[in-house]
Image (cartoon, rainbow, N blue to C red):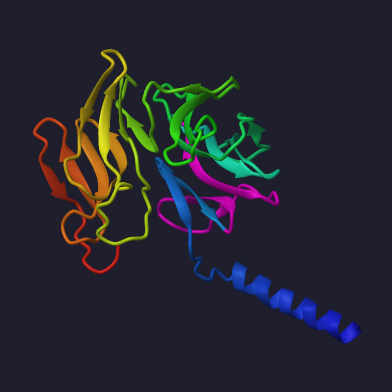
Amino acid sequence: MKRIFLFAMAVSFLFSIRISAGFEGRFMRYPDIHNDRIVFTYEDDLWLVGSAGGSATRLTTAPGIEYAAKFSPDGKWIAFTGSYDGSSNIYLIPSNGGEPKRLTYNPGGVQTVAWTPDGEKIVFRSGFENAIGRDPRLYFVNRNGSAPERLPVDRGILCSFNSDGSKMIYNRKGVEEYYWKRYKGGQYVDIWMYDFIKNEFTPISDYVGKNAYPMWMGDKLYFVSDRTNGIANLYLQDLGSKKVDPVTKYSDVD
């Protein structure tokens, strides 16, 4: 037993050397950036790293899953999805770390999507009101705590706001990460615009296929699509002229 214990201690020590020596991490997911800081999920915990690279700082250590972290517009807070007691909910922590504050208590799954531009509300998607779990809806909760409210759209999975929050570009339906190449079936992801003041809906994408991760910046829209060769790349669309240009041109992997 003593030899087994010493062997286990040695293996643990060697493993700690591997980590501290800066071996390359793999399978980082759900990155979000604010100025020169990036938050991401690695091994089901949240980590923080500078955009120039370097050592990452671990933000969470709880025996649960944390993902889909989003910086607040001022960079002071991070909202994320956490699964600690069998269900996923929205939590909030200071961007430098701290004790998570639970914001939602709904049945069913949730995923953090975005912040409103004023930094007061956190948008998430969930199917807790759905009779069937096909298409989730978009909700928001106040960062100081409130009952969740549904955004005035029939369904949605991802979204991005203009600077004053009067309009929203969003993926209305589908699955942003389906695994079928060149898929054009009923779960393909399209992009729409909603005007909160005029209560108007406008289709943005006209390509039947992947149009995911909309990011609204000024009068431009960045998004991911497989429209050129069946490989997902980053594209830029001028919202005035509707002209779409590729930003990346990968031809091997998404």
Q: Residue at x 32, y 17 (%)?
A: 196
In the orientation shown, which residue stands out farthest toward the top? 197
Along the horizontal axis of the image, is 47 left or right of 213? right
What are the residue bounds of the magenta stretch?
A: 43-72
Q: Does residue 114 show up?
A: no
Q: Residue at x 59, y 20 (%)?
A: 146
Q: Position of residue 218 (x, y in %)?
A: 23, 30
Q: Is residue 48 magenta?
A: yes
Q: Position of residue 54 (x, y in %)?
A: 48, 59
Q: Position of residue 69 (x, y in %)?
A: 50, 42
Along the horizontal axis of the image, is 49 left or right of 89? left
* On screen, residue 134 above or below 140: below
Q: Is residue 86 magenta?
A: no
Front-most of residues 122 and 147: 147
Front-most of residues 213 and 118: 213
Along the horizontal axis of the image, is 53 left or right of 254? right
Q: Residue at x 18, y 53 (%)?
A: 227
Q: Quadrant of residue 233?
A: bottom left
Q: Does residue 212 show up?
A: yes
Along the horizontal axis of the image, is 33 left or right of 143? left
| Quarter of the rendering occupied by the N terminus | bottom right
Q: Quadrant of residue 42?
A: bottom right
Q: Position of residue 111 (x, y in %)?
A: 50, 40
| Quarter of the rendering occupied by the C terminus | bottom left
